[in-house]
Image (tube, helix red, strand yellow):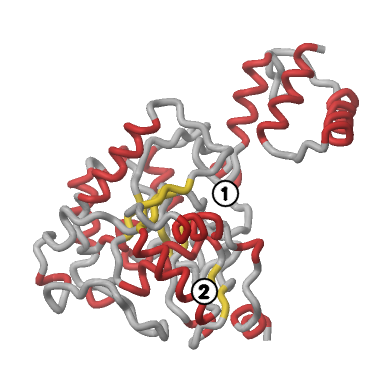
Amino acid sequence: MLKTLLTNSTPSPQLQHHQPLQIFSQLYPHFDYYWQLEMDSRHTGHIYHFLDRAVSFARQQPRKYLWERNAYFYTPGAHGNWSEFTQMVHESLSDRSNRTIWGPVSGTGIRPLGPDPPVPYPEQDNYTWGVGEEADFITFLPIFNPQDTQWTFPDKLWNFRNGAGTPRRAAVITMGRYSKRLLDLIHHAQATKGLGLASEMTGASWALFHGLKAVYVPHPIYADGQWTPKELARIYNPGPPENVNGAPVSIWNFDHRFDHIMYRLSYMFTTHSAEDLYRRWLGYRTAEHEGGRVVSTFFFFLLVWFFCSGFGIRNNFADFSVLAIWGSLW
């Protein structure tokens, strides 16, 4: 009953982070690609160089076993360099290629408009299809199958013929690059058929439906803790090789088993490390036995009340920064 309600009701505007981007692409259709970046992210290097390198990396990725590689948290200390990682995934799928994604998927109720594979089966391709092809969707965290997970929004989809049985993919954090072609396909399906998925499933799923190129671009992520690369790779990549993180043991399960690691990464939907780093920079302690000043709880909440009531400031990271600065001055 719950899944029927979720898959046949009106899409929620609260779960449509791409609406402004879609509207922008309709009003300014002369761009080939559009970036969506969240305002609470910070990049410590040259952002143009970072994005340009991400595009170049995505362009060079072959389509063979791409969706399967996309699901991994690539960890160089455990997986080796990118060629060694690609070979590892290849070998793990040697007897499972019929379970991998090759072109558009079936069972969506949508007529795919993307390119057909040049050969019937992936094992017939020598990692050539897709090389030099621009990616329609680029993201900065793995793309996984949410269907059998306890992720936050696995069944948040609307008006699809097969309901919760519709194949789909998710990529946490709605930052990345979207092609005009992909945004037009999303817009048309939403506007004419009322089809919809939760924000973090939208870009990846429509690329999956139409056989478009989607790439997760690995980048340096700092883990604030004493874990080895092999430990992190084991914890963050559970499940069979054709469906990493798509099984009930997914790292994306919102059961809080690994919050002590997940919330200590430098790039994630939320992180404690950023707050701790900022507090330490101000000279405040973040743990009971750590050196530094102690923040008065009463004074902190007094500041929160003052700013929120006097200036109508919403609770986000930037506002917390203002409050912390005022606290340090006090």
- Where disc 1 sits, the SS reads loop
- The answer for how far apart the CA atoms under marks 2 and 1 are is 35 Å
Query: In what quadrant of the picture does the N terminus appear?
Result: bottom right
* Point 69% across, 38% down: residue: 316
Could you tell me if residue 234 is visible in this image?
Answer: no
Could you tell me if residue 22 is visible in this image?
Answer: yes
* Residue toward you, 142 or 138: 138
Q: Earlier in the sequence, mark 2 or mark 1?
A: 2
- The residue that label 2 is drawn on is 190
* Residue toward you, 81 or 214: 214
* Residue toward you, 244 or 203: 203
- Where disc 2 sits, the SS reads helix
- The residue that label 1 is drawn on is 258
* Residue toward you, 177 or 227: 177
* Point 19% across, 50% down: residue: 60
Query: In what quadrant of the picture does the C terminus appear?
Result: top right
- Total numbered labels placed on residues in the image: 2
139 sits left or right of 55 in the view:
right
Q: Horizontal and vertical percent for residue 189?
A: 47, 76
| Label 1 Cα neighbours within 10 Å, binned few <14 / some 14-19 / many ≥20 | some
287 sits left or right of 90 in the view:
right
